[in-house]
Image: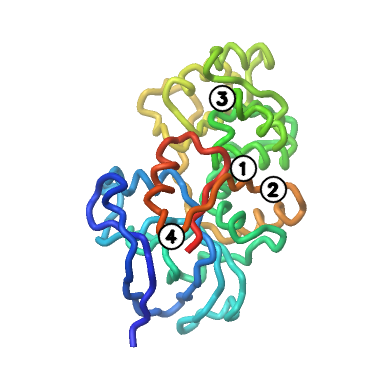
Amino acid sequence: MAREMRAASFSEFGGRDKVTVGTMELPELKEGEVLIRVKAAGVNPVDAVIREGYYKDMMPHLMPVIPGWDVAGVVEERGHAARRFEVGDEVYAYARRPEVKWGTFAEYIIIPESYLALRPRNLSWEETAGVPLAGLTAYQSLYDAGNLQEGQSVLIIGASGGVGTFGIQLAKARGAEVVGVASARNHAYMRELGADHTIDYKDQHIGEATKRIYPDGVDLIFDCTSGESLQQSLMALKPGGTLVSILNQGKDLDPGINFRFVFVEPHATQLYALRELAEAGKLRVHVSKTYSLDEAAEALEQIHTLHTTGKIVVVP
């Protein structure tokens, strides 16, 4: 007999009114897959972007779509040859599949066991769910694409948001100096995370303010917002420095800039690295608000404002 679950989903692209909560039938558990009982699901800006239909030409969507790519939960069942984890193990994952269909805003999700890592033991379920997508994005942007080294300087644009929050902490864990860009109300928060300097994008030119701190420029710019803030920052990039963006794909940039665009990939080994940092006290997760499954549409509206401090989470 097929198992049913409650889930938030949408059957056509659009606004918050397209998201409904109801009962859905779980798919069959296949070889190499595990069934996870969802304890918490992180909410990310991309979830609202997908609901609006902006990614429909980038990857296939199978309606109805359950939003959500972040999950923290418990292994309940294992398919054939899925033996890396035991039933009852507490895990977390960045659950993006090649097709957009089965997300994490639900009571259960089935995903390949290769996506999973044991969760940080010192974090709550809600905090754990806030790590995968944003944490991996910052990790792959700073460490892989940006090759950030000890003693270097990094300017993080949008440093108080989900990805930026991890960006500050991962940069400090690597021994770099950090300039965080966000509104003034978030400056104390960024400094608590380890930012050495803060800049308010609302009342000063980001590039000029950065140059006053580092006259020769910074080694790395990590762009989490794009737009005018990115354009202002470019003058502060040191010759030979690197620009990494998770939004801008380089179309309006000088081709001479050492530029990397990052679209985060699932990576269980890096999730274990993030787990180690969290358990060592070098990675904190600020959950500013939790939402019930019935409030999933509201959570997507909040994340769509792009003014969320830290992370927000859906708890089924």
Give the distance between the C-alpha atoms of the residues marked 3 and 4, in whole angstroms. 30 Å
Query: Would you call the spot at circle 2 few (<14 residues within 10 Å), some (14-19), or many (20 or more)?
Result: many
Mark 1 closeness class: few <14, some 14–19, many ≥20 residues within 10 Å: many
Q: Does label 4 or label 2 sit earlier along the sequence?
A: 2
What residue is shown with label 4? 293
Q: Nearer the viewer, mark 3 or mark 2?
A: 3
Inter-mark Cα distance, 1 to 2: 7 Å
Tag 1: amino acid: Phe
**Which residue position is annotated with label 3?**
183
Given the current orientation, which residue lies at the most extreme right position?
A: 280
Name the one closer to the observer, 159 or 210: 159
Tell me the element at label 2: loop
**How many neighbours does mark 3 have within 10 angstroms: few (below 14), some (14-19), or many (20 or more)?**
some
Evaluate if marks 3 and 4 touch, with contact meaning CB atoms under 8 Å apart: no
Q: Residue at x 34, y 88 (%)?
A: 1
Q: Earlier in the sequence, mark 1 or mark 2?
A: 1
Q: Secondary structure at mark 1?
A: helix
Q: Amino acid at mark 4?
A: Leu
Judging by the rendered image, the residue that carries numbered circle 2 is 283
Task: Give the residue type that dot 2 points to.
Answer: Leu
Q: x, y (%) of residue 299?
A: 43, 48
Q: Which residue is mark 1?
A: 166
Q: Indicate whether 154 appears above or below 145.
A: above
| 181 and 150: which is toward the camera | 181
Spatial separation of the CA atoms under disc 3 and disc 2: 22 Å
Distance of label 1 from label 3 (alpha carbons) = 17 Å
Q: Which residue is at a point 39% across and 33% down the rendered structure image?
A: 249
Q: Secondary structure at mark 4?
A: helix
Specify which label sits upstream in the sequence, 1 or 3: 1
Distance (Cα) linking label 4 and label 2: 27 Å
Kindly tell me whether residue 99 is visible in this rendering: no
